[in-house]
Image (spheres, coloured by chain):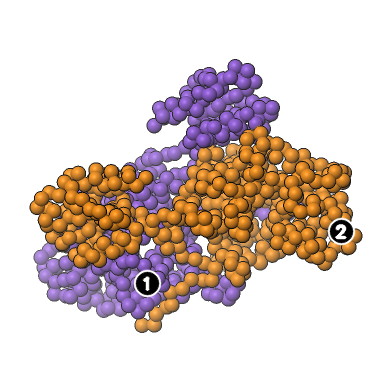
Chain colours: A purple, B orange
Amino acid sequence: MATIEPRNLKGFRDFLPQAAIRRQNVIASIIKTYERFGFVPLETPALEYADVLMGKYGEEGEKLLYRFRDQGDREVALRYDLTVPLARVVAQYPELSKPFRRYQIAPVWRAENTQKGRFREFTQCDIDIVGTSSMLADAEIAQVMAAALANLGFSNFQIRINNRKLLNGILEAARVPENQWLATLRSLDKWGKIRAKGVEEELSGFLSEKITSAFIALLPKETEDFSSWSERTIEMISATTNGVEGIKELNKVMTSLAGIGMPEGTFQGDVLLARGLDYYTGTIFEAALTDTPEIGSVYGGGRYDKLIGQFIGKDIPAVGTSAGVDRILAAMEELGMGIPRSSTADVLVCMMGEELAAETSKLANELRTAGINTETWYEPDKLDKQLKYADKQGIPFVVLFGSDEKEQGMVTVKDLRTKKQEQTRKDFCIQTIQNLLQKEQ
Amino acid sequence: MATIEPRNLKGFRDFLPQAAIRRQNVIASIIKTYERFGFVPLETPALEYADVLMGKYGEEGEKLLYRFRDQGDREVALRYDLTVPLARVVAQYPELSKPFRRYQIAPVWRAENTQKGRFREFTQCDIDIVGTSSMLADAEIAQVMAAALANLGFSNFQIRINNRKLLNGILEAARVPENQWLATLRSLDKWGKIRAKGVEEELSGFLSEKITSAFIALLPKETEDFSSWSERTIEMISATTNGVEGIKELNKVMTSLAGIGMPEGTFQGDVLLARGLDYYTGTIFEAALTDTPEIGSVYGGGRYDKLIGQFIGKDIPAVGTSAGVDRILAAMEELGMGIPRSSTADVLVCMMGEELAAETSKLANELRTAGINTETWYEPDKLDKQLKYADKQGIPFVVLFGSDEKEQGMVTVKDLRTKKQEQTRKDFCIQTIQNLLQKEQ
């Protein structure tokens, strides 16, 4: 028989148990934080009508959509993010109470260039607050990012905050033509990599020399605090409607975070932060881990007050953020954080003879009823093989119940890491293991 | 601006918060049971090379695959189940320890006829044991099904068990041509709906009259226990190699379940159970809830010793089962079980004035630090609006901290269900709410 080569599509990954356990732990921690702030779960389909997703991500983004015609000849696409599906849901169910504060943790699909180390299927962890323009909501999103990272065990991170209106004020003050605003911001977004010189070079490709230098002149010299801008810049931005609003909003978010008591170094205004997506209209955020700068931002988001209006013709304000599980896991690995066992079981009850199978299974069930995660062995293999398996899986304890033990009403409990073993009365087996597990913690 | 109609694809669903919370609770309970038996998680991609999935589900199944060409002109398909991806993984990573006992809980996609009330995206909860032919593994799968249903709170369910080899023995004894075996089994699978008469009618469409009656004559009269078969039937089946092995295997599973102490009525041999999928080779199972018979089976599975061999040319035995979350939820709804709040928050801290926003947020953070899920309000709206929101969301408690309270160093805690409220010192707020929440449980 011809066989089929078992293989993955490029950019798609299997998570074998140890990796899957790590991912589950990270996601469980993030969910706990989101629920601590009262966010509620939402689930949306993987497939959407293509027109629901089109026109939201910019030309470059749109090319990455997995689009096809289904059996009913409908044009469909796999979701590209969780924000546009949320906007669709809010438009579709006007009965949802506002503010609608939802989280969604789910895979998204983008036909990215895998040579850049990008994946085509990856998991996003989103929170959004829909139905309020209050900057307290923007501040809360920043606060949840900080809490999620802290609860994951990261002690050093920084949230950079900017505002698209403020950036629009700069664009206006520098007289950048409005149809070049998004392109200019996309260049500015690369500042971290290509610095002022690179941005200037890119801009001079589509802006006049005069406008390019006017724009660059309005930016802070390097990544400086928002408050350290030159008075002249603030003055010029303040002459634009966009700029006035942007400064006011950014100030409000920063003041609110300080008022709540967010530690100083953890958040910072940063006018060089632009973010690539088209749909942002106000506050924008990014969070990065200061101990692993090369990993880039682990959270990104912002306010998008016009997106839901694309479905119902009436704007509903919204703000949110999205964490990338892969980057968080990469950082944890680099920092040696939270490496779990590759097993969910605490105990393997070995099989010491087929005639003892029923009693072995019963013993295992007693352990399970007592809340101890327990595996059994199915075949009368040599004990050595069973112990090797348990060791390789990272199962800490094995229980031996052979004919000798049976005769004496005893079991042997062995700790595979210390190689110590003890005999105990069969009816004390649960307690013995519970004691050993408690010592673990 | 032209708007885009917000809508779902037919057969695809949004789960709004209350429904999503219910689903999460069910899935969390199932995971807990699976881990109690030491199963470990595996995650595989939504998209696979189409040839990995083809030739596994029968002609009818294959038509339901969502197939398309991706940007790299690869023929790809959304996964149809979690079993074939598992078989691929086992073939692809020979380093995985055996027995490999994994669970996977994830959506699958099938372009089903939605008029039959079927969904095109639905979540499966699978466990499988790969790498052992021992019938103890088959018995364990049945045991985990029973434990999962019991832990979800179902008290009445029945697991029906059969064996494809035994069925093959019947087919052989009735002299059904081997190329009609699968078709015959697919008809037999409908016994529950169309009864003996219907099956006979279907069979006579492609089998001779003589063979049809020989086959029907070998079946028990109605759904009878395996052990109650006529001696003549057993004798005839026992004259075939398939039948001998099938009877032996089924006996072993039944004896083992009895030996472990599975309560009698919860499992039953049932020779009329056939299951539609092509890849089963031995034991097959189905579990149904006896209080909601119209919902059909909530678990289905079996042994598939030849599937992994399709990838590597060398057979690796495997057995497993899959739960349908939708049917479990439908049954719970019908039986009035486990209806959760539509909120994750325990408390809403109201906003009693914009000047108190920072202090309100700080108070909310103190509650969160104490492990209490807490929302805040973002705008200085009328209290009535805030209370209505909390009530509609099912948030049990609100905390009021207005200028009066501030002056006195107090807060007001109100239970929205009893309408009772009490004043307490601000620094006792956490304890007051913890006490109220404890009373809840």
**Residue that numbered label 2 is attached to:** B213
From the viewer's perspective, is B234 left or right of B67? right
Task: Examine the rendered structure and indicate whether residue A51 appears above or below residue A224.
Answer: below
Mark 2 chain: B
From the viewer's perspective, is B319 left or right of B374? right
Q: Residue drawn 44% across and 44% down?
A: A22
- Quadrant for the C terminus of chain A, please: top left
Q: Residue drawn 79% across and 65% down?
A: B202
From the viewer's perspective, is B287 left or right of A367? right
Q: Is residue B353 visible?
A: yes
**Residue that numbered label 1 is attached to:** A94
Mark 1 chain: A
In contact (CB < 8 Å): disc 2 and disc 1? no
Nearer mark to the viewer, of 2 and 1: 2
In front of the other: B382 or B15: B382
How far across and how far down the image is residue A217, in percent? 18, 68
How far across and how far down the image is residue A65, in percent? 47, 68
How far across and how far down the image is residue A374, in percent? 54, 35
Q: Residue drawn 51% across and 35% down?
A: A369
**Three-letter code for the amino acid on which mark 2 is drawn:** Ser
